[in-house]
Image (cartoon, coloured by chain):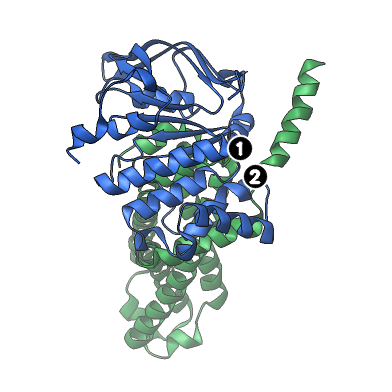
Chain colours: A green, B blue
Amino acid sequence: MEKNSDKIQNKAIQKQIKLPLMKSIEISFESLRIRFWRSFITIGGIFLAIAFLMSIFTSTSINLALAKGASLEVRSRLGEMGDIKASQMWLVVLSLMACTVGITNAMLMSVTERYREIGTMKCLGALDSFIVRLFLIESGFLGLVGSVSGAIAGTTIMTLVSIIRYGSDVIATYPFFEILKYGIFSIVIGTVLSIIAAIYPAYRAAKMTPADAMRTEV
Amino acid sequence: MTDQNVVRTKNVTKVYQMGKVFVEALKGIDLEIKTGEYISIMGPSGSGKSTLFNIIGGLDKPTTGQVFIDEVDVAQLDAYELAWLRCRKIGYIFQTFNLIPVMTALENVTLPMIFAGMSGDEMIEKGRKLLEMVGLGDRALHKPAELSGGQQQRVAVARALANDPAVVLADEPTGNLDLKTGKEIIELLRRLNKEKNVTIISATHDLKMLDVSDRIVWIRDGKIDRIEKRTDVTLEVGEVEGE
């Protein structure tokens, strides 16, 4: 019985503490705008990581497509198929790792420097979930913008480089769907990594007592 | 002034672990504070007054002992109830102002109101009134970086009063301000205390505070050294500062 009445009371209290979604979006975007250069650099980190990953994917796809469909002359310049696969796989793995570390680092820094702000919000009566939501919106947006622009840049640059190197055969055999697939994969990876890397420290800070969060020096 | 206790602590202790060493910051504090009082918690740095402040405000948990705010045991509250308490019952003022840097003065003041479910014109109206009350009516749309220290602290005072709290807790509110500005903030707090009957609890080592306090709690080595009424303190504050 007592548990039940506790629950009802809790519900009543939950309703009394709120942060409307529109307001959270507004606050998040304002935070991004006012910290424009900080946000810009964070996006830059994500952009570079994803552009690198995507350029490796693109060149791999183009080389494989060329190896199948291009003229003999181009194929001989590509060298042995086995070599391409081995070296490109290694590059993909390497770029994935660089991308993970880069994005995690950029997001971790941008959250940990705001522990005091998180503590203050809690003093004013914010629930942990408000804080997590604010950072979710922010990091999701940063991740998406960085990843999409990175994927586009990586693909474009690598396609141009291939055309310069191998000529019009690249366009004739262009593996459009393959690259689109990798593009979506890269964007998802970039966004998800950004969100995880931001949410984890934000959640940890939100869970701390406000006194600890405000005392933490990073 | 009523006889009701707005804050009561019962044998509160706090132990911090610093590496392998345990530091006893508070060694059993019993304190009763009545509605409408202006209390100063005085003591040298490291005496445990900030720790006590944090514990009274529900910002930190005591290691043992109990804290009652409006006769509710804070330790028994879950996350939602604690947020509710911080939002509606307590207003906080910090030494470092702690305004949200990305928001204007008005937005800083209205943020706790948003959490409390207010919205629209009613909220803006109240925020503006509070800012006028602290003398910053014309600075409502400025960001903290565009305000002086004293002005930022005024915004913080207005923010602390956003949801008409029962208690305002001020941790070294004058610590980062010059003499004159600090005095203005103290006078502001005193005025609010009188006009709105808000209980004010201030951790400080600013002697200017003595003059306006109803009672002064002296903390030493994590224990209450003595509690004095203002009328019993003979110190002439003006003379100490050489004004």
Amino acid type at circle 2 is Ala
Classify mark 2: residues with Cα within 10 Å, few (<14), some (14-19) or many (20+). many
In the image, what residue occupies the spot 33% across and 80% down? A76
The chain carrying label 2 is: B
Amino acid type at circle 1 is Arg
Give how far across and how far down residue A132 sits, in percent.
54, 46
Give how far across and how far down residue B133 sits, in percent.
51, 52
Q: CA distance from mark 1 to mark 2?
A: 7 Å
Mark linked to residue B88: 1
Which residue is under mark 2?
A: B116
| Picture quarter with the N terminus of chain B | top right
Can residue B128 be seen from the camera position used here? yes
In the image, what residue occupies the spot 34% across and 82% down? A161
| B236, A167: nearer the viewer | B236
Can marks 1 and 2 be said to lie on one chain?
yes
Where A30 falls versus A135 (above or below)?
below
The number of numbered badges drawn on the structure is: 2
Classify mark 1: residues with Cα within 10 Å, few (<14), some (14-19) or many (20+). many
